[in-house]
Image (spheres, rainbow, N blue to C red):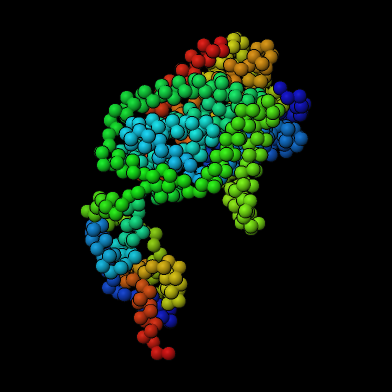
Amino acid sequence: MSGPTARDVMDPKPTVLAATDTVSKGIGYIMSGRFRNVPIVDGRGCYLGVFGVDCLLRLVLPQAALVEHGLTDISFVSDNLKDLRRRLHEYEDKPVTVCLSDEATVIRPDTPLLETLLVLHQTRRSVPVVNPEDGCLVGVVSYWDVGKAILAQEV
Amino acid sequence: MHADAAPGLILGLDPLWFATGVFALTYILVMTERINRAIVAMLAAGVMVLAGVLTQKQAVGGVDFNTLGLLTGMMVIVAITRKSGVFQYLAVWSAKKVNADPWGILVMLALVTAVLSAFLDNVTTVLLVAPVTLLITETLKVSPYPYLFTQIFAANIGGTATLIGDPPNIMIGSAVGYTFNDFVIHLAPVVVVIMAVTLIPIYLIWGRSLQAHADDRRRVMEYDEKEAITDRRVLVQSLSVLTLVILGFIAAHGLHQEPSTIALFGAAVLLLLDNYPRTAEAQTHAVHSALTEVEWVTLFFFLGLFIVVHGLEVTGALTLLANQLLSLTGGDMGVTAMVILWGSAVASAVVDNIPFVASTIPLIKAMAPTFGGPDNLMPLWWSLSLGACLGGNGSLVGASANLIVAGFAERAGHRIKFVPFMLMAFPLMLLSILIASGYLWLRYL
């Protein structure tokens, strides 16, 4: 590839979670960094999936509303913030892998820049960059990284 | 027996054996579920016509459009009614009526399921009640298994009580001309007894240990069932039409109308009420949406199956089978009724009861001369209905509703395993058939 690639705009030292980290730690990262997703890696730094806000929502919503053919309207349930906090608390000491999603789109370091932007546009979240040879995470591309790289160019 | 003439040899085979072979192959393919059952039935129906077992005219004549119309009409009505949230309202209301007591909720949700199943199809009923059940058990921190198990039973038992509760009853009613009232008068009493008796072992096995913390019960009591009603206009319209349709079923005999006419007319009226103020484009979208809720796979399965079974009927295969059955039972009404009841119960526990009932209906009709005419066959029809509907409780594959609940439970992380379910369900199903036997014996034999 001769043109710019994902490697040129990615953050090579992103915030990551180890598979053994707790949900509580993951929540801390998400809240402090305003992340939508945080990659989870194994002991060798290989990419396993992401821990994201979608899953956190799943943890506090009733399961009956999340399963296929479940409740489509739960306005009759009047759980308050304390109830939600209690529900979340039940998961806080569990490993982040309870919330691991391996369905997030990933790109390669040599993915062309425009393709990288298209994936960002389609997924609307930061995209993990994974080395295809060993499956290890080499970086993350976010809107901000791309924006910074574009704005650094002279018109 | 149908008056149409049977054709000559087909591929060197007597048409009777050719038709029997096609039917047996259809049955096997439906059981294995490797190919969608609608495809299997339509292919088999095509073979019956293309091979010359039936003419095109005979094939169309073999289709019971009353059954198809009734199923379609009710599916459309339910598809619109469910948008109102009334079924969630009922489930939450019933849970609160027993102060969120875990055992009380199990009983109430079972009763709601049974009553709804009597008027709606069983799959729809469990799809509506199971998610609320999961929500309540999640809140109470109790296992949903006993609740879902009981609801499977309640759906199949409740569906037995009326003409429209379960497809076997729709088929029997349509084929024999029995009315909505006939089913209620003859089957509802024993269904009430069976439902009540079924709850006793369930209480002894699970009920006594169902406990919930007071705080969790309070959270259930805080549910506001009125908020479950999402569209009051649809609620009023759909309940009005549903009530009128049921009244129509009750009065159908006096009105000289078939249930399918009433159901389809009710569906058309409800579609009109639901769409009247909308633009043409919005109407198209809404009608399309309501019609996509119709289970076309089931309808085309029925369509093909009716033709295949008609092929068996025309070739005389079912008359032959009926005569063999009668020679086994010695032509005794009581013995024949019990053979049909227990045989259809066991068969329905392991195979799809729709093809079973479709092929047994003409078989029973063929017994009319032995028992002094069609009017004397009533005990056999109720035996078939009770056996086929209640037999579905015998295993997870016995009825569509069972599989729907099992699939839902699995997605929610509460797997209902085949063997443990059957170890509990099969004896309970046999208990219900025992009660049905006593009822038939005392009332008709």
Q: Position of residue B86 (x, y in %)?
A: 48, 42
Q: How many discs appear?
A: 0
Which residue does the image show at 40% across and 47% down from the upper left? Answer: A76
To which quarter of the image does residue A95 belong? bottom left
Farthest residue to the bottom: give it.
Answer: A155
Q: Tell me if I can see residue B197 in this picture.
A: yes
The front one of B93 and B73 is B93
Instruction: Examine the rendered structure and indicate whether residue B187 appears above or below residue A9.
Output: above
Q: Position of residue B295 (x, y in %)?
A: 57, 42
To which quarter of the image does residue A102 belong? bottom left
Q: Is residue B390 left or right of residue B56?
A: left
> The C terminus of chain A appears in which quarter of the rendering?
bottom left
Which residue does the image show at 27% across and 34% down from the upper left? Answer: B211
> The N terminus of chain A appears in which quarter of the rendering?
bottom left
Which residue does the image show at 35% across and 52% down from the upper left? Answer: A61
Q: Position of residue B342 (x, y in %)?
A: 51, 19
Instruction: Examine the rendered structure and indicate whether residue B242 appears above or below residue A137.
Output: above
